Structures are given as C-alpha cells and as structure tokens.
Amino acid sequence: MNSASISEAASKTVDQVRLEANQKLNPQRKAALGQFMTPLSVANFMASLFSPTNSPIRLLDAGAGVGSLTDAFINKWGSQGVTVSAYEIDPTLIAYLQQTLHNFGNGTFHSNLITRDFIEDAAYKITLGTAGPGYTHAILNPPYKKINSDSAHRALLRAVGLETVNLYSAFVGLALQLMAKNGEIVAIIPRSFCNGLYYKPFRQWVLERSSIEQIHLFHSRTSAFNDDEVLQENVIIKLIAAKPQGKVIITTSSDTTFSDLESHSYAFTEIVQDQQDQSFIHIPVSPAHTGQSEVPLATHTLEEVGLEVSTGPVVDFRLKEFLRDQPDATTVPLLYPTHFVNGTLEWPRKAKKPNAIVHNSETRKWLYPSGFYTVVRRFSSKEERRRVVANVVDPASFNSNEIGFENHLNVFHSAKKGLSADIAHGLAAFLNSTAVDDFFRRFSGHTQVNATDLRLLKYPSLGDLQLLGHWAQAQAPLTQESIDQHTRKLHGQRK
C-alpha cells in the first residue's frame, strides 16, 4: 500500500471514529457544549486551503473532538516538523483524540493534548503575555453556542478586548490573537457573523487583525453537518494574521462532495461593505451578483423615503396575562406570523397562538394605531424557499382602532403610524421580488430577517413604491412572475 492509500485508510478510520463517538455523546451535554463534529470531506477540503510551507508548523486545533481536522491536516501536509496543540474538554472525545494523535508516532511530530477550557486558557495567556511565539496554523470547527452576557466566558473575553456573543466567534477571535504574523486560520463557522449588530465587534476584530483570503459557501444550509441535522448556514473562511488585505477568493459548492466547486476572485470592496458603519460581509455567488445595484428599483435608503421598520413590540411571554385566544370587547387584534397564510391575512385564526391582547393602560404603549402596514416575518422555516416574506395588514380586516404586532414580525411604519395603501402594497411587492430575496441571502447568513438587516437594504423611491403598490392591488392573483416582471419593467423605465 502506497503512502497515499495509507493516509486515505487512516482518514477513513478517523471518520468512522467520529461517527462512533457522535453516537456515544450525551445529547444534553452535546447541546450544552455546541458540539458538531466535522465530516471527512469537509475536513479534507479545509486542510487543502493552507499554503505549502517548509518551515516548522505550530498547529492549533481548538475544540478538536476526535481529531478529524488535525488528521486531515497531517494527511495533507505531513507530520514532519509539526507540533499540534489540540484542545478538548469532553471526556468521551478525549479518549478518541488521544488515539488519533498517537497514530502519527513520534519523530519530529509532537502533540499537546490540552484538556483545559480553550477560552479560559487563551484569555489568560493573552492577558498575562505568556502565549509564546504564536501558532503558524489553526484549523477550527469551534462549538456553536450563545454566551450569556453575565458569564465567566464573557468576562474573560472582555478582558482581552473581544466583545462577542457566541462560542464560535470567541474561538476564532482568540485564535487570531494567538497567531504568529502571517499565520493561517481555516475555520468552519456559521454565516451569521457576516451581518447584524451583535457580530459587528467581532467583524471589526477580524478585519483589524487579518486579511480575508477565502470564503467557501455551501448552497444548502443543511449540508455541512447533515449527520447532526443542523439547520445552519455555514461557511469555511481562511484568514491570514497581520497581512494586508488583497483580493478575496469566493468558492461555492452545492454540498460537501465539492463536486461542482466554483471559484472566483473579487475586490475586497465587493466583499466588505461599510454600509451604515456595519462592515457587513457580502458573499456573492457569482461575479454577476456582487451588490444591491442589480436589484431593480433599489435606489434609496429607508430613511430617505421617510419610512421606518421596527421589531414587533409585543413579547408574548412578558404580557402573557393579557393575551386572549379569541377577541372580545376588551381586546384588540394581536398578529403573529401564523396569521399570514399564502400572502393572505387570516384573523382570527384557530391556531396555537392567541388572536388578541387586552387593551388597557399596561398594554397601550405596545400597540400601533390601526392602519395599513407592511410586515416581514423574522424567521423562515426549514421548508421555505424564500428568506424575505412580506405581507400587508389592511385595517379593513378588523373593527379596531389599535393593533398589536408580536415580536416575530418586523413592521414597516411611518413614525409608528400606518402607511398609505399604495405604499404598503408597494413595499410588500418590492420585498417579495426574487431579486430582493436573492440579494438578502447573499449578505445574510441568518435564518432570521431582523429589522437591522431590513434597514440596510435599498428601496424604491416613494413615487415608485406608490406606482408599484397601485399596480399590485389591481392584480388578481398577484404572482411571483408578475412581481418580478413588473419591477424590472419599472426599473427599465427609470434608466
């Protein structure tokens, strides 16, 4: 058996170990630690992204699991002159990891299996200045789990100057701080860091300390960790510490076989856009899709057209005592996403959610005056093709002077008052266009559609919204094809 065959056999063994260990993990502890182990094909692809080197390698594998990533790295680049620091705290996985590291033998390969918490260990080393010469390479599949604002982890991260909300961004941020100059990091992480306020400090941390060399995007958001049934859009990102930023390579594939891999190079300004001081990261799927300039009629900010968007203010569990299954003389309508079915408002509706909220001095401040509104659901389901789904609230649907919007809806309004019928319908038609949904998917990795994300979009002028809304109300039925055709037609008339 030649060396390539030996390496391939060893990798298959480690991948079998990964599947075996995955079955043995306690589900509650796995969820608590945010553990999702790396499939063989993904590990091999990640290892292939590093640059060849003849220099000694100091490799970091934080959250190493059974050692799949280290194994892929060694199989690709060899074990000679490699020192690996593998962090793992789960006792079940540590036993498997020991065996993986042992398989590489001695010689000039050295391994340090570290059973301490990576965030604690890294933060102390950075704070005390005892981190050493820095890692030359890091290959990471960090845990995915929110960090509580009052937790010990959050305090440690703040001590080193990193403000972030999830374990995965904490791991990448700390690893970057531990890298030697020109050290390379390859990590598979959720795409959610690309936009939004919560990850803004992390994006700035990364951009200040490294260059983005490559991002790989999977077309399917369930692909990367399908063994664990993870509904999460993931990207593989390559960073180089303290290197001036150049062009960025974007690769894409339908799934983890990488059989239809495509690669394109982009100017950095096409990838990182400092819109409203957000520094959000835009991942085009092809050179033809690099910005919102391609979206028909998208010419103005929301502020420029005099409109606002806010998250629905009624948080049901906080106002539970005032919620009612059915309306009565003491209530006003309360709208949830479930009240919108195939583009139509159905209220009241027999469903698990309440239909009304008591109107009194305690709830009044959370209500909107009756009127036309455009609403967008904050969460898309696994089965839905679209990310952005907009609907119109027509005041004729209710006999009420006020309306409640539950927190899972985003509400377009004018100074917390209703819109004209034409504007509301025009906004809904524009937001439901295929071009808007495609663009949103390219810059947002969330399954969520937050008000902040909607504020970052460009919109038609007020006049075009009125024209679009007037047209939309005359259509029966209003179809996806007709929306797309009409927005392109209006756009062509404006050129």
Image (cartoon, helix red, strand yellow):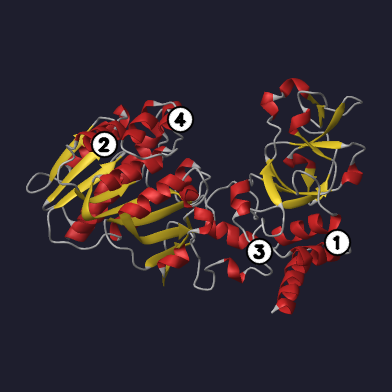
User: SS for tag 2?
Assistant: helix
Quickly name the residue at label 3.
Answer: 300
| Quadrant of the drawing holding the C terminus | bottom right
User: SS for tag 1?
Assistant: loop
Quickly name the residue at label 2.
Answer: 122
Which is more foreground, mark 4 or mark 2?
Answer: 4
In front of the other: 484 or 331: 331
Report which quarter residue 468 is drawn in. bottom right
Q: Which numbered disc flags the more N-terminal residue, 3 or 1?
A: 3
Question: Do callouts 4 and 1 mark residues in contact (Cβ within 8 Å)?
Answer: no
Amino acid type assigned to the residue bearing label 1 in the image = Pro
Q: CA distance from mark 4 to mark 3?
A: 36 Å
Which is more foreground, mark 4 or mark 1?
Answer: 4
Which is more foreground, mark 4 or mark 3?
Answer: 3
| Quadrant of the drawing holding the N terminus | bottom left
Q: CA distance from mark 2 to mark 1?
A: 59 Å
In the rendered image, residue 297, in percent from the top left (x then y), is placed at: 69, 69
